[in-house]
Image (cartoon, rainbow, N blue to C red):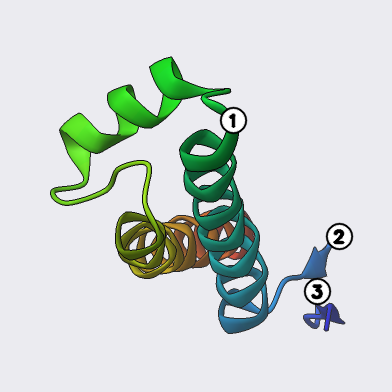
Amino acid sequence: MATKKKGCSHEQLCPKCLGLAFGLVWGIGLFLTALLDSSTGWASTFVGSIGSAYIGYGPSAFGGLLGLVYGFIDGFIGGYLIAWIYNKKC
């Protein structure tokens, strides 16, 4: 939830909440994209590109689960940092 810091002109963001939201969206997105690629072949270029950064990520159920974990961790860290930097603005 956003809270207002005394003497601050903008709302404060909850870093854990934003991290959780970003992590879930990115992780689930990677998981669904891997499954979609394994069943239809759609997004194979994207899956291949992400697979070069996330070891083991690929167009399979296991690769999708790895993408879910990697994506959640990456998204959480990214969302947390965005909120933390935003809050430091004040």
- First of labels 2, 1 by sequence position: 2
Instruction: Look at label 3 and name its amino acid.
Output: Gly
Q: Is residue 41 above or below residue 15?
A: above
SS state under label 1: helix
**Rendered-image quadrant of the N terminus:** bottom right
> Considering depth in this image, is 71 or 34 the residue closer to the camera?
34
Alpha-carbon span between mark 2 and mark 3: 7 Å
- First of labels 1, 3 by sequence position: 3
Q: Closer to the camera: disc 1 or disc 3? A: 1
CB within 8 Å, label 2 to label 3: no
Which residue, given by chain and number where applicable, does mark 1 sit on? 40
Residue under the point 65% across and 59% down: 25
Alpha-carbon span between mark 1 and mark 3: 54 Å
Q: How would you rate the neighbour count of disc 3 (Cα within 10 Å): few for under 14, some for 14-19, many for 20 or more? A: few
Which residue, given by chain and number where applicable, does mark 2 sit on? 9
> Which mark identifies residue 77?
none
> Which mark identifies residue 7?
3
- Give coordinates of residue 83: x percent, y percent: 59, 63
Left or right relative to 54: residue 27 = right
Instruction: Look at label 2 and name its amino acid.
Output: Ser
Residue under the point 31% across and 64% down: 62
**Rendered-image quadrant of the C terminus:** bottom right
Left or right relative to 64: residue 18 = right
Residue under the point 45% across and 67% down: 72
Q: Is residue 50 above or below residue 63?
A: above
